[in-house]
C-alpha cells in the first residue's frame, strides 16, 4: 500500500530590530544572560506595551513577498498560559487578525515549480530562553519580547525535500529583506513540522504528529524522511499513529517522543486591552513595500541580464551579504562576469580561510571593482592583480595607488615588447622550426620566456599576438 505525506510548517522568525516588540529593551545575541531586559519585558506592575514600528514594517514586507493580503488594522491578543518562559503569564500575539493572510510562494522541485499556499503571518513576542540541566532549569530573559513573525503554511508539502526547499525560500526572503539574519543555529529562525501520512490518492488527513524546534534546514529533511518511515511502519504493523509532539535527535537521526497530546490546550485568547487597534494608512503600507530591499528572485533576473551564468548567480545569491557586496562593486563599472569570478573565488577563499563574514572583509566593494577594471584595461596582469589584492588585504587602499607604489603596472608598449620578442626568439631558434611544423605549443613556450624575462610585467595578450606575427615573418 503506497503512502504519501501531508506536511505543513510553522516557521518562527526573530526580527532584526533595534528594540523589542513592545518595549525599548535592546535586541542582541550572545550577551550575558539577563542583561538586556526591561520592566515591560518582565511585566512589572504599571508598565504598558508600545508597538515597534519597524517590526510592523518588516511584517508588511514579508507578507507582500509572500503574496498575502495585508490587514490595514493591527489587533493584538493575549495567549494565556503559565510557564516559566513567560514572565507575564501570557504572550502578546495576533490570533484572530494576523497582519498577513492567504498567500503563497513557489519552490523549485525535481518535477518543476510547485506552489505552496501560506495560511497566515502574524506578529508576536518571543519567550525567554530556557537552559535545562539534570537538576535545574536556567532562564535567560534577554530573548523575552524580541519581535517575531510566525509564518504558517497550508499542508501542501509531500516530502522532506519540498519542506527543505520551502524553508530555504522563506529564509532567503527574510534575509534579503533584512528582516532577520535567518541563523537557525542561533534560534533566529525556528521551524516546527506537522506531518501525517495517508494512502496515496486519498483526500483524508491522517493523525498529525508535530516535530518541534528543528535547528537546521538539513535536519528538517532528515526528520521528515524518518518520520514518514516511522508512521508507515506503525500502520503496516497494525498499529495506530498517536497524536504527539516529537523532537529530532541528531545523534541517532531519529524523531523521539517528547509528549503525547490528548486534548488541545485552551489558551483563552482575548484582545489585549493595553493595545488598542492601530489603523495603518494606505500610504504607510505602500511606503513599506516600495522601500523593501530587493529579493533574491529579482536579483536572479537582473544578474541573468548582465550575462552571468546560472552557477555564478546561485553562488552570489547563497548569501545576501555577498550579493550586496557584489552589487556595490558593480557601481565601479567593472565587468560583471570578471567581478563575479573575483567575488566567488578570491573573496570567498579569504572568507573561508579566516572564517569571517563579508561584513568583516577588509577590501571595500568599490576598491575590488577598481582592481577588476585595471585588469580589463590591461594595466596589470592577473598575477600582478593578485599581488595588489594581497596588499589590499593589509590596507584597504585604491588599487590604482597601490599599483604605482608597488611598480606593478603592466608593460603594453609595443616597441618594448617587440624588442623582447625578437631577443627571445633569437635565443630559441628551435621554436621557429617547431612552429613551422605546426607545433602551436612553441608560441606558449616563447610567451612564457618573455613573461619570465619581464618578471610578468608584459601584457600577455599583446605579447602572444606579437610572437605569432614574428614567427610568421621568419
Image (cartoon, grey):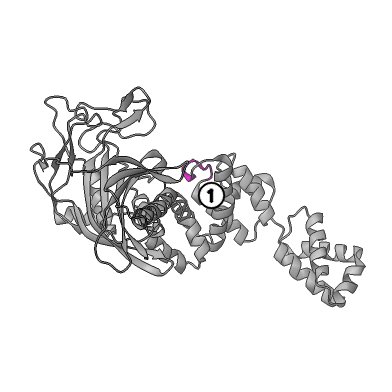
Badge 1 crowding class, 10 Å Cα cut-off, few under 14, some 14 to 19, many 20 or more, is some
The x, y position of residue 292, in whole percent, is 30, 54
Q: Give the secondary structure at mark 1.
A: helix
Q: Can you see residue 262? A: yes
Quarter of the figure with residue 290 = bottom left
- The vertical placement of 3 against 216, above or below, is below
Q: Which residues are magenta?
A: 358-363
Tell which residue pokes out farthest to the top in this image: 135
Judging depth in this view, the residue of 391 and 53 nearest the camera is: 53
Instruction: Give the image location of residue 438, x and y in percent.
Output: 84, 77
Please tell me which residue lies in front, 88 or 81.
81
Which residue corresponds to mark 1? 367
Q: Is residue 473 above or below residue 253?
A: below
Q: Is residue 464 left or right of residue 428?
A: left
Q: Position of residue 121 (x, y in %)?
A: 23, 52
Residue sitting at the far front: 238
Q: Residue at x 48, y 61 (%)?
A: 313
Q: Is residue 111 magenta?
A: no
**Which of these two is toward me, 216 or 350?**
216
Q: Is 308 positioned to the left or the right of 439 in the image?
A: left
- Image quadrant occupied by the C terminus: bottom right
Observer able to see residue 409 = no
Q: Identify the residue at image location x=33%, y=44%.
A: 246
Height in image: 33 above or below 186?
Answer: above
Amino acid at each position: 500500500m503506497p503512502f504519501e505525506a501531508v506536511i505543513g510548517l510553522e516557521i518562527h522568525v526573530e526580527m532584526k530590530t533595534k528594540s523589542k516588540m513592545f518595549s525599548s529593551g535592546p535586541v542582541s545575541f550572545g550577551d550575558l544572560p539577563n542583561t538586556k531586559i526591561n520592566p515591560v519585558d518582565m511585566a512589572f506592575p504599571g508598565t504598558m506595551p508600545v508597538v515597534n514600528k519597524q517590526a510592523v514594517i518588516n511584517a508588511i514586507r514579508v507578507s507582500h513577498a509572500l503574496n498575502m493580503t495585508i490587514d490595514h488594522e493591527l489587533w493584538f491578543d493575549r495567549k494565556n498560559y503559565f510557564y516559566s518562559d513567560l514572565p507575564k503569564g501570557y504572550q502578546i500575539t495576533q490570533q484572530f487578525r494576523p497582519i498577513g493572510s492567504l498567500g503563497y510562494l513557489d519552490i523549485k522541485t525535481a518535477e518543476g515549480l510547485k506552489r505552496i499556499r501560506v495560511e497566515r503571518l502574524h506578529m508576536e513576542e518571543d519567550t525567554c530562553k530556557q537552559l535545562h540541566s539534570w537538576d535545574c532549569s536556567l532562564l535567560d530573559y534577554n530573548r523575552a519580547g524580541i519581535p517575531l513573525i510566525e509564518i504558517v503554511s497550508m499542508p501542501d508539502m509531500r516530502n522532506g525535500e519540498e519542506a527543505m526547499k520551502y524553508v530555504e525560500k522563506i529564509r532567503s526572503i527574510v534575509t534579503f529583506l533584512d528582516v532577520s539574519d535567518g541563523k537557525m543555529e542561533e534560534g533566529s529562525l525556528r521551524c516546527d513540522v506537522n506531518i501525517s501520512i495517508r494512502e496515496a490518492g486519498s483526500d483524508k488527513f491522517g493523525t498529525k504528529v508535530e516535530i518541534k524546534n528543528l535547528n537546521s534546514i538539513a535536519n528538517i529533511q532528515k526528520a521528515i524522511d524518518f518520520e514518514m518511515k516511522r508512521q508507515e511502519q506503525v500502520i503496516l504493523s497494525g498499529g495506530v499513529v498517536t497524536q504527539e509532539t516529537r523532537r529530532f535527535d541528531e545523534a541517532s537521526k531519529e524523531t523521539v517522543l517528547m509528549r503525547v497530546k490528548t486534548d488541545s490546550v485552551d489558551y483563552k485568547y482575548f484582545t489585549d486591552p493595553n493595545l488598542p487597534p492601530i489603523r495603518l494608512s494606505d500610504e504607510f503600507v505602500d511606503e513599506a513595500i516600495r522601500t523593501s530591499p530587493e529579493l533574491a528572485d529579482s536579483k536572479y533576473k537582473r544578474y541573468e541580464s548582465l550575462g552571468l551564468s546560472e552557477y555564478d548567480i546561485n553562488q552570489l545569491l547563497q548569501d545576501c551579504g555577498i550579493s550586496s557586496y557584489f552589487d556595490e562593486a558593480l557601481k565601479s563599472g567593472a565587468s560583471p562576469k570578471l567581478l563575479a569570478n573575483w567575488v566567488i573565488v578570491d573573496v570567498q577563499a579569504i572568507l573561508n580561510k579566516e572564517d569571517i563574514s563579508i561584513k568583516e572583509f577588509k577590501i571595500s566593494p568599490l576598491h575590488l571593482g577598481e582592481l577588476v577594471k585595471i585588469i580589463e584595461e590591461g594595466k596589470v596582469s592577473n598575477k600582478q592583480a593578485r599581488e595588489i589584492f594581497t596588499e589590499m588585504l593589509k590596507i584597504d587602499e585604491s588599487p590604482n595607488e597601490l599599483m604605482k607604489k608597488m611598480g606593478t603596472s603592466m608593460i603594453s608598449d609595443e616597441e618594448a615588447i617587440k624588442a623582447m620578442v625578437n631577443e627571445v626568439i633569437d635565443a630559441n631558434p628551435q621554436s621557429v622550426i617547431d612552429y613551422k611544423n605546426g607545433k602551436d605549443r612553441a608560441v606558449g613556450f616563447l610567451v612564457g620566456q618573455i613573461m619570465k624575462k619581464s618578471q610578468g610585467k608584459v601584457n600577455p595578450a599583446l605579447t602572444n599576438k606579437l610572437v605569432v606575427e614574428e614567427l610568421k615573418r621568419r
